[in-house]
């Protein structure tokens, strides 16, 4: 994924600087140049480059070795290649000793440069892949990994840090796709239970009989097919956290069983006679209004109060649109890596499409939209054309009537919109509205519509 990596070339000789930059650009890399060591350090402070090519002899009081050392103070693991016209054993030893990854001799060989860069980038790609795999394996979603700059989300992250080491039950509310499980994981992995199990259960995905055995386990012979003793999710989560997703869909009988676990911290396996005691923190989530469910007698009030010790209400994505560019860039890098597509950026036009969308599916819908766009993209940058499916879906929904608008107000708005569309052409507008010109003139007068720009 070359376009994801930027390279800096620092050399006081313009011909050498531009030649090396041109060779690298031909290989598909993004290349910046600096005419001095001081300028290179300034650019390194602003951008984390994949590779730094630095000339050994540069005027201005800062040579290549000094430049490299300053850059490595800013970027600890910066891969630096020293370029020199004065290759000796001493200069090579000095460069490597001070932290240079490689050194090359002028005049440079383009093929040698290409092979060197390819080798370094391959290592960096492997490092990135290992980091992603490590996170996936550990499932370590700490609060500092949540991408947001929304004030309400910042408050939620602060709260997760404050309650992370408590045993109090947490109820997370929010629409589907807002990231309820991510917040639950942040609570678990930020606290003193982080090294213990984090177990998830989808209460909406299983029928009552299966959900009961899933939660509490079962003994051999408890039901047809129960060939041996099996521990349930509460046992597996002992000393850790159990995340009960869509708790609002749990059946009435299991509501009573769950209440007992929350009160007594003990239960029986299905078909068992031995009481099992556990130390489990419960984090539950729902997209439903449980208070309303209680009023409608679909959810036990005593269970609701037990669950709702600490409540976190996650705002939908449409109410935190400032997070959309951050999330888009964050998700784009991961998805592009996973599907092995060379996508390096997202255009302003594409971001506008994302910002204008209402995201009923929230962050999950955004992630799915980005994956679809990345898979079908034929360039290295996502543009508005790659998100045409979003604008098409929006157009198909049609216009919804604003609440409280009268029929006359609707007619007035339809006339104004049509006149705008036809740039004031009465004949064309009347044809689109399905009325004759005299009728349109009467309605313009009736509704006192501004006539500026209106023609016959």
Image: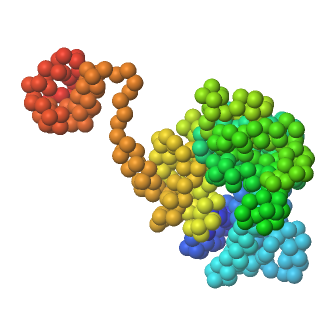
Q: Which quarter of the image is occupied by the N terminus?
A: bottom right
**What color scheme is it?**
rainbow
**Percent from the top left, x then y, of residue 440?**
14, 26
Q: Residue at x 23, y 28 (%)?
A: 415
Which of the pair 317/101 is nearer the observer?
317
Q: Is residue 333 visible?
A: yes
Foreground of the two, 339 or 13? 339
Numbered disc total: 0
Q: Is residue 29 visible?
A: no
User: Left of 325 or right of it: where is 446?
Assistant: left
Q: Quadrant of residue 316?
A: top right
When asked about the image quadrant of residue 111, the answer is bottom right
Instruction: State the residue at coordinates (48%, 50%).
Output: 350
In the displayed structure, 250 sits above or below 120; it is above
Q: Nearer the viewer, residue 324 or 114?
A: 324
Q: Quadrant of residue 44?
A: bottom right
Residue 24 screen position, x and y as percent: 61, 72
Q: Measuring 73% from the left and 71% from the top, which residue is drawn there?
A: 126
Question: Is 307 drawn above or below residue 231 in the view shown?
Answer: above
Q: Residue at left 50%, top 46%?
A: 354
What percent of the width, then of the height, locates residue 375? 51, 64
Q: Position of residue 173 (x, y in %)?
A: 66, 36
Q: Quadrant of the C terminus?
A: top left
């Amino acid at each position: 994924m070359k376009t994801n990596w930027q390279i800096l070339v620092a050399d006081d000789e313009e011909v050498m600087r531009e030649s090396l930059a041109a060779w690298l650009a031909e290989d598909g890399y993004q290349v910046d140049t600096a005419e001095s060591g001081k300028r290179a350090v300034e650019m390194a402070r602003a951008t984390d480059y994949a590779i730094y090519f630095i000339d050994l002899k540069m005027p201005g009081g800062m040579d290549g070795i000094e430049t490299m050392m300053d850059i490595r103070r800013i970027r600890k693991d910066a891969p630096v290649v020293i370029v020199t016209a004065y290759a000796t054993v001493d200069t090579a030893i000095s460069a490597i000793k001070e932290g240079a990854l490689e050194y090359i001799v002028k005049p440079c060989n383009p093929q040698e440069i290409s092979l060197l860069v390819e080798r370094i980038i391959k290592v960096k790609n492997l490092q990135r892949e290992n980091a992603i795999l490590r996170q996936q394996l550990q499932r370590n979603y700490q609060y500092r990994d949540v991408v947001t700059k929304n004030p309400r989300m910042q408050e939620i992250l602060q709260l997760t840090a404050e309650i992370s080491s408590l045993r109090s039950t947490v109820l997370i509310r929010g629409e589907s796709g807002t990231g309820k499980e991510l917040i639950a994981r942040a609570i678990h992995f930020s606290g003193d239970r982080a090294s213990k199990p984090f177990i998830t259960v989808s209460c909406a995905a299983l029928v009552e009989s299966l959900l009961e055995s899933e939660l509490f386990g079962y003994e051999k012979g408890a039901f047809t097919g129960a060939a041996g003793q099996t521990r349930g999710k509460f046992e597996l989560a002992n000393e850790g956290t159990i995340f009960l997703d869509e708790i609002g869909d749990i059946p009435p009988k299991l509501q009573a069983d769950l209440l007992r676990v929350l009160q007594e911290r003990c239960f029986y396996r299905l078909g068992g006679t031995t009481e099992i005691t556990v130390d489990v923190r419960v984090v539950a989530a729902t997209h439903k209004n449980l208070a309303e469910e209680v009023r409608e007698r679909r959810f036990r009030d005593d269970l609701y109060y037990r669950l709702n010790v600490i409540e976190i209400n996650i705002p939908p994505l449409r109410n935190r649109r400032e997070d959309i560019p951050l999330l888009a860039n964050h998700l784009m890098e991961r998805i592009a890596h996973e599907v092995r597509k060379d996508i390096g950026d997202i255009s302003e036009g594409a971001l506008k499409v994302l910002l204008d969308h209402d995201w009923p599916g929230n962050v999950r819908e955004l992630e799915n939209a980005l994956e679809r766009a990345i898979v079908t993209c034929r360039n290295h940058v996502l543009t508005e054309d790659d998100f045409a499916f979003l604008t098409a879906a929006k157009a198909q929904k049609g216009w919804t009537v604003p609440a409280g608008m009268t029929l006359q107000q609707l007619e007035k708005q339809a006339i104004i919109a049509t006149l705008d569309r036809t740039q004031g052409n009465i004949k064309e507008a009347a044809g689109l509205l399905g009325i004759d010109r005299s009728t349109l003139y009467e309605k313009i007068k009736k509704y006192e519509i501004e006539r500026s720009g209106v023609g016959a």
